[in-house]
Image: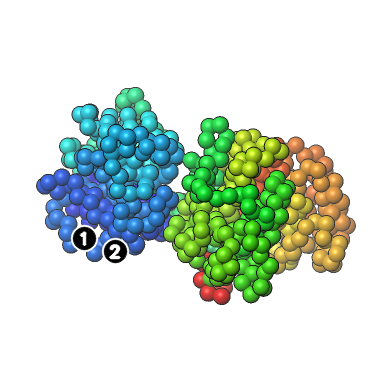
Amino acid sequence: MCGIAGYIGQRNAIDVVYDQLKRLEYRGYDSAGIAYLNGSGINILKRAGKLSELGKLMGQRPDECGLAIGHSRWATHGGPTDTNAHPHFDRYEQVAIIHNGIIENYLELKTELIKDGHEFRSETDTEVAAHVIGAEYASGVPLEEAVRRGVKQLRGAYALVVMSKREPGKIVAVRNASPLVLGVGQDENLLASDIPALLPYTRDIVILEENTIATVTQHAIVLTDGDGRELPLKTEHIEWDVAAAEKGGYEHFMLKEIHEQPDVMRQVIAGRIDDEGNIRLDKVFSDFVWHEIDRVNIIACGTALHAGMMAKHLFEKLLRLPTDCYYSSEFRYGDPVLSPRSLAIFISQSGETADSLAALRLCKEKRIRTLGIVNVVGSSIARECDRTIYTQAGPEISVASTKAYTAQVMTLILLALYIAQVKEMPGVRVPEIAAELKGMGDRAKVILGLEPQVVKLAEQVRRAPLFFFMGRGADAYVALEGALKLKEIAYIPTVECPAGEMKHGPLALVSDGVMAVFGASESDVRDKIVSNMREIQARGGTVLAITTEDDAIVERVANVTLKIPNGPFDFLDALLTIIPMQLLAYHVARLNGCEIDQPRNLAKSVTVE
Ligand code: AGP
């Protein structure tokens, strides 16, 4: 997600903040900006594109400047443009603000502010937050009080850093769900979204707690709670080197991104499910007529197609909407039969996959309606689709997709619920499923607690010559993704198929030492899965079952069982079984000494055929 930087002290604050932003570049961004105080007030330099674009404006900076804040933006609301780049002013240009996160109620706030005469330059939720805080500040209260009052009107995830013209020796910061750390220096203090941007200046940091207001001056940091009461300052000394810090202390980006999934599952739905359980995608589909659609074609590659297969399962099971899945590379050359009443959905983390982009252009030539499910805002597929829903997973650095997959599936579930809601389908319990979606992050967090068991299992099975990944129903589709993870980072051969397909050929590959991973979350086919397990074991294979806590039959048969918390909807349980499979692939690869984040022969975005 976005990078945040701030400095107050004796050095040239603009140079320090620019350097901090360079140290945050690995997080991925598409625009950057810096705000600083000069004689006449607050000055903002900002540009779309890489930091070097902002660097071209540095010649304008004053030689002396003791306070600055900076930001590298990963676009969520509004494309990557100069205007949408942070920092943003309030109405009176008395306050400048930078933000990481998603303000869920920004549209309601913006509507009310416009009625009060506010004018907005950008499409961002951040500018709305600036106006809210600026309006409080205009009453004459100190900046920290304006921030305290302002954030009480915001809903959603945010890390906010604020400076003002009236109080030039002060930076105020607050967070809710988005990361923010403070650096405690000698006669200087710093702020950042991530530790790497602090380490060159200090190793003494303060992790800002949720809903705590930090008032940062050159010689002090004062923490207060939502009522203004002072809180103790707990400093930690960081021993990490910069490389470790960029991974948040994890050994690889892949493991960091696996562990980000609880937050990502919350980010995906942020602002998209209201308090009554209604799905809010009207902005994407404002004039779309769903009753005209008689078929959905999902076109993608790799992990993205595996997410699409989960959507096929759901669209047909829940919506009774005929749905086909196509490999992009096959679709573009296969002369597909396309109904003029069909919707083509393109799923892509990068939004730049060549085969998917070519398939999209083919559909547009045939005047087929197109929808993108994309992570990178402003990417080619996002721009060229008629409409796009962004997965809001934040930048995914590791070549092996993990959080992007779960974000894609969660987004597609939201879409399915939205279609059911718009078509008023009585059989689809939209509010109940929506409520379960809100709890997915918590369940994912619990499942990550299985990691020590997975590490032990990985030590036992890491030399297995072949892995089967199988399941039934939604589990069969998750199995495809679990297999791809092991293949692409541990280079171990896998067979992935619906469990019922085993006897039609793949079973011939089972012998001593073969490992079979079964997703067994679907309770109504568990007895069939148990038979398949026995067929594997009878031929020397070893069975790992990933099932739910309410299961009592699978664990009696499997050689190893991992249990995940179960819920009322099988397809949500099935999605969560991918987390132990991701962890298994990661730890097998790590124990086998594989290069994990950049596996051989693969690229993060396949922009060529
Ligand atoms: C999955 O781990 C790989 N990174 C790969 O299969 C990837 O999902 C595929 O290349 C599609 O990429 P996209 O989502 O950026 O289009």
Residue at 51%, 55% (x, y): give it.
Answer: 388
The answer to whether residue 578 shows anywhere in this view is: no
Residue bearing mark 2: 53
Residue 253's x, y, as percent?
50, 57
Real-space Cα separation, disc 2 to disc 1, in angstroms = 10 Å
* 49 displayed left or right of 365: left
Image point 29% across, 63% down: which residue? 53
Few, some or many residues within 10 Å of mark 1 (<14, 14–19, 20+): some
Q: Residue furthest left?
A: 39
Q: Type of residue at label 1?
A: Met
Are the two marked residues, 2 and 1, in contact with CB atoms closer than 8 angstroms?
no
User: Mark 1 CB in 8 Å range of ligand 1?
Assistant: no
Residue placed most toward the observer, 182 or 3: 3
Report crowding for label 2: few under 14, some 14 to 19, many 20 or more residues within 10 A (C-alpha).
Answer: some
Type of the residue with mark 2:
Glu
Please count the marks in the image.
Answer: 2
Query: Where the C terminus falls, by quadrant?
Result: bottom right
Residue 46, visible in the rendered structure: yes
The residue closer to the viewer here, 33 or 200, is: 33
Secondary structure at badge 1 equals helix
Colour mode of the rendering = rainbow
Ligand 1: give its quadrant: bottom right
* Residue at 21%, 40% in the rendered image: 92
Q: In this view, does 211 lie to the left or right of 469?
A: left
In what element is the residue under mark 2?
helix
Across and down, in percent, residue 121 comes to 30, 48
Residue bearing the label numbered 1: 58
Q: Earlier in the sequence, mark 2 or mark 1?
A: 2
Residue at 60 percent of width and 42 percent of height: 422
Q: Where is residue 177 in the image (x, y as percent from the top left)?
A: 44, 39
Against 586, residue 551 (above or below) is above
Along the viewing direction, whichever of 356 and 363 lies nearer the viewer: 363
